[in-house]
Amino acid sequence: MKTRCPAAPLGLVLFGLLLLDGSVLFQTYAVDVEVKDASNITCLYAKWMMNISITYESESNGFKKTAFTLPEQLTYDGSSCGNDTKGPVLAIEFGKDHSWVISFTKTADTYQGSISFTYNTNDTELFPDAKKKGLITISANYPERPVQLNTVFSCNDVDFIEDDNVRQDFWNVSLQVFLEDGFRSSNKTLCDQVTVPTATVPTTTVPSTTTEPNDTTSSPSPTLPPEENPATGKYSVVNGTAACLLATMALQLNISQKEPLIINFNPNTTSARGSCGATSAVLELKDKNNRVVFVFAARAQNAERYYLREVNITVAESTNETLFAGNRSLNYWDTSRGSSYMCRREETLVVAPGYKINIFDLKIQPFDVEDGQFSQAEDCIFDVDNFFVPIMVGAALAGLVFLVLMAYFVGRKTHRNAGYEQF
């Protein structure tokens, strides 16, 4: 077996930008791999970008989420072109006993992959306080539907598979297995096509894949800036049967990475999910292919206060590009435990250069929610008041000193005048 990795020694392309002493994360990973047989003929070609997020139970009996991309150091032991009874296999190992393996099978006309992803909760960097220790494996099919032989499976939009508590996001996918004579096909099977149903199910349409005769693909119309502010939505995260996180907000993304891009989240099409723990909480809002993840944490030096520590943004700008930015060192919305945070005025969160979030009519409580109701709110107006208090106190003291001095000089002058008259 030979693995050709034209862009990097380990088949991994890393485009990274670390700013503010490493506090801002803005990076994208791409896998670019060819698996060849002993005759140097390609049997598998794969190129994609990928994020993995896992929800796990912590030692405090709460649930936390860890999210990561494939690291820089990868090994491909176990990858092969297969044989007469077994199809090609791409095996990736990384970190502390984590592995991601996709095995392919074919019929007379199609091929399909089966993913086996194993993660190790003994890895304290990814799972610092996991209650269950050891290796956990999940399986899923990808692509979701069989792909026509002698075509390249192509998916530029964000595509995902989700099994229990593991979600795998893929985009900019280009994949072909069982290549004829080792050459990639010029035909494509797209992931985002829809077929018209047969007469037996006249009221529904089902997603499917169709074969494209050439490399041209249509792109959606560019997103135009909304003319109005976003609508306000109400969101919650449920732990068991009770809400553990409450949020009300109007959410707008402002991205100027290239052309200005403004995206309003629509509460009617936005879904919310997340997790709640003793010291951290996660709120994920997703509207179509656009997603924002808020991560809250208790302060290390004062557990009686919490703040917004991290934000991740994923935007499917077009069929050709997905934008991602994150910041793990934020310091917004500092609030006392047992209270909610409220801000009626517009707030702007700077996540990374060219990535901002505009938030209106905000009220949020990620900890200590009781009976599904917000607790007493700490208003952001106090942040402004606190800024002016020292100035007002200083001005008052200066005025008092001025009055004392004036009284002194007036009194002294009066005393001197009275003395002259007596003389």
Image (tube, rainbow, N blue to C red):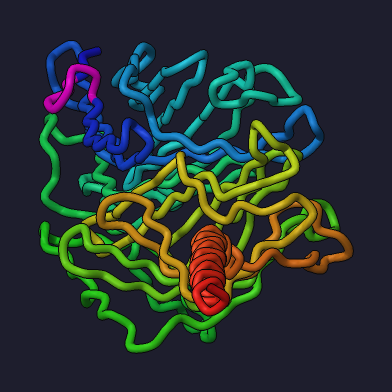
Please report the residue visible at 38 percent of the width from the left and 36 percent of the height from the top.
Answer: 23
Q: Residue at x 54, y 53 (%)?
A: 294
In magenta stretch: residue 9: yes
Does 295 appear above or below 354? above
Instruction: Inspect the magenta stretch and tell me whether residue 403 lies in it.
Output: no
Q: Main secondary structure of the magenta part?
A: loop
Residue 217 appears at what percent x and percent y? Answer: 16, 64
| Residue at 38 percent of width and 52 percent of height | 351
Residue shown at 79%/54% (left/top)? Answer: 338
Rendered position, 330 above or below 360: above
Left or right of 274 in this view: 39: left
Left or right: 328 in relation to 106: right
Percent position of residue 79, x then y: 34, 18
Residue at the outermost front position: 423
Res. 268 image quadrant: bottom right
In the picture, the quarter occupied by the N terminus is top left
User: As drawn, which residue projects farthest toward the bottom?
Assistant: 227
The residue nearer to you, when weighing 306 against 60, is 306
In depth, the one of 191 and 386 nearer the eye is 386
Q: Position of residue 214 (x, y in %)?
A: 11, 59
Residue 149, percent across and down? 27, 46
Q: Which residues are magenta?
A: 4-11
Q: Is residue 341 left or right of residue 18?
A: right
- Residue 21 in view: yes
Count of all numbered marks drawn on residues in the image: 0
Q: Is residue 360 visible?
A: no
